[in-house]
Amino acid sequence: MNTPNQALKQWISQAQQHLSPDRVVWCDGSQAEHKAILAGMVESKEMIPLNKDSYPDCYLYRSHPDDVARAEHLTYICTPHKEDAGANNNWLSPKEGHQRVDPLFKNCMQGRTMYVIPYSMGPCDSPYAQFGVEITDSPYVVANMYLMTHMGKEALEYIDKLDTNFVRGLHSTGDLSSERRWIMHFPDEMMIKSFGSGYGGNALLGKKCHALRLASVQAKQEGWLAEHMLIVGIENPQGEKTYIAGAFPSACGKTNLAMLIPPNTYKGWKVWTVGDDIAWLRPGADGRLWAINPEAGFFGVAPGTSQQTNPHAYNMLHRNAIFTNVAMTPNKEPWWEGKEKDDNTTTSLTDWKGQTHTASSATTAPMAHPNARFTVSCHNCDSFEKPGKAYQGVPISAILFGSRRRSLVPLVFEAKDWLHGVLTGAAMCSETTAAATGKVGVLRHDPMAMKPFCGYNFGDYWNHWLKVGTNLSQPPKVFHVNWFRQDSQNQYMWPGFGDNIRVLEWILKRCHNQVDSQETPLGVLPLKGDINIENTTVTGDTLNQLLTVNGPAYADHLTEVHNFFQTFAPRNPQALMDTCTKMINQLKNY
Ligand code: GTP
Ligand code: SPV
Ligand code: MN
């Protein structure tokens, strides 16, 4: 393939010289090409074709056992000034960043194919589309980018006319050694260099690297937001559709909320999936906040996905899907913990590493990796709301911040105004999950669910959120939710999944001024009886517990949050500090 874009031409030829691949393939994004890539991987035994009848055109991929999640400790933002990256990021100067990885890339594609993937984040003809080109030596990355982005010929036609205004992503799996693994971002150069990992967010550079870390920097300069958020439209029985966006940390429920199916008693309610992981949000001329999903597919957590918990997701997985690190049954169906209502682990299973277990050799280790994933196109999803021509997005009425907290944080509360909403998001802490390497279940600060993804100083980021609010005459209402409260027996107290519509119903009523509420120093809470728990196992007593504000304990928590904000001084917004202090004082005696 050829391009009149001189900047692109030059970069590709420089890369080719440095990487020394045996051959260069420009990806056209056709279905035939996708099939050929998969067939090649089957041939080389990198992909296992799954059961042709029950899972047509589905494949299993097993990653290197040390390469199963995002590597946050190896992810860097490279800016001339350390303060611009902030304490929330690992930092190197651009010079040091390049120096660290460039030698690793030298001749690393000898004997391999260098794929050139032109892609668009957002439909190519959307005024908000952003373009990029990823160079990679991983056919797995090519196959996933085909499902996850608008990739190939059409994107290249746009890039042809772009001069230098596209993201350059250089990726090689190298030898997959975690000793030689780095994910470097150069915001000033619109460049990413990722070496040594083939997994998800480390390797599919359009996703977290481009659409969040680099885009968040660009968004700050241009007055919009690039966020780790799902987008969903909720249609009530009267046919009114309200769109909400939700920031939940990795593996904390975005995909599930984006595809929610209300229980049978919620007749006439319907949920439309716009996006499940990333939202680009812009103030519109009408003073509302408008959102697009820059992705074209879902890279979702497999464990826990079942016909009961997430039927839309479960159904979309049965064709044209790539499974990564799931287990496999003897008849070549994918398997993971929580797939069936009752786990039948007595049948023999091949675990995510390829070891076969029978009932007699059963282990307690999970058969699927806890961060096992599926990749499918958005078009596989029955509830997907297709973007139209020249897509400008959907207007957002509410923003949800949702964390994984076994105690303290109520099921739902509403922020009093935009400033309080920004504080609510910035104060978010969540228990860590298998989506990143490291310990699971450790409480950490994850402001706006962006700890691993904000490409610049959190202090500047919170200021930017406040500033965006000043450009909204009709800002979304902001809420905090927590589906993950546990009782003394470590059982979830809230049924979650489809039953989360019960909380969304209250949120929608708040958005449309249809329900009263009670003010507390933490925020606005539902009145007794305003969360519908009919036909659930939730008792009134449990609901009371879920909606109780423990003032002194919350004050302690916010005191710690205040200290955390302080670590971003002098860039932390004073208004946030003051509001936090005021809340601490009120909550102490509540
Ligand atoms: P990333 O793709 O990593 O960004 O994750 P995500 O935020 O999209 O999370 P996802 O919806 O995939 O859910 C992660 C895990 O949490 C899965 O195992 C789900 O089954 C589980 N989960 C999701 N929603 C709920 C809920 O309402 N209640 C409970 N108890 N578990 C949930
Ligand atoms: C996440 O970790 O938030 C994900 C998976 O959505 S990854 O693409 O690996 O970032
Ligand atoms: Mn995510």
Image (tube, grey):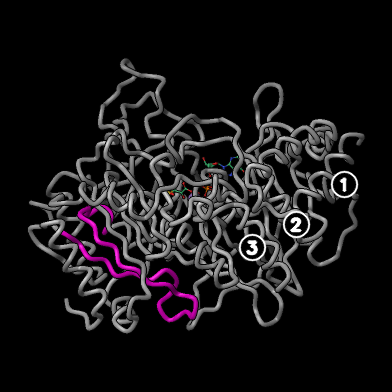
Answer whether residue 367 is visible to the viewer in this image.
yes
Q: Position of residue 524 (x, y in %)?
A: 84, 51
The yes-or-no answer for disc 1 within 8 Å of ligand 1 is: no
- Return the residue nearer the eye: 187 or 82: 82
Residue that appears at 20% across and 54% down: 137
Q: CA distance from mark 1 to mark 2?
A: 13 Å
Element at label 3: helix
- Say which quarter of the image contains residue 158: bottom left
Q: CA distance from mark 1 to mark 3?
A: 38 Å
Q: CA distance from mark 3 to mark 2?
A: 30 Å
Query: Mark 3 or mark 2, which has the lower sequence index?
Result: 3
Residue under pointer 1: 529
In this picture, which residue range is highlighted in magenta?
114-142
Residue that appears at 75% across and 47% down: 412
Instruction: Residue type at mark 3: give it.
Output: His
Q: Position of residue 246 (x, y in %)?
A: 62, 56
Residue under pointer 2: 505
**Magenta residue check for 133:** yes
Answer whether residue 316 is visible to the viewer in this image.
no
Disc number at residue 464?
3
- Return the residue nearer the eye: 563 or 400: 563
Disc number at residue 360?
none
Instruction: Residue type at mark 1: give it.
Output: Gly
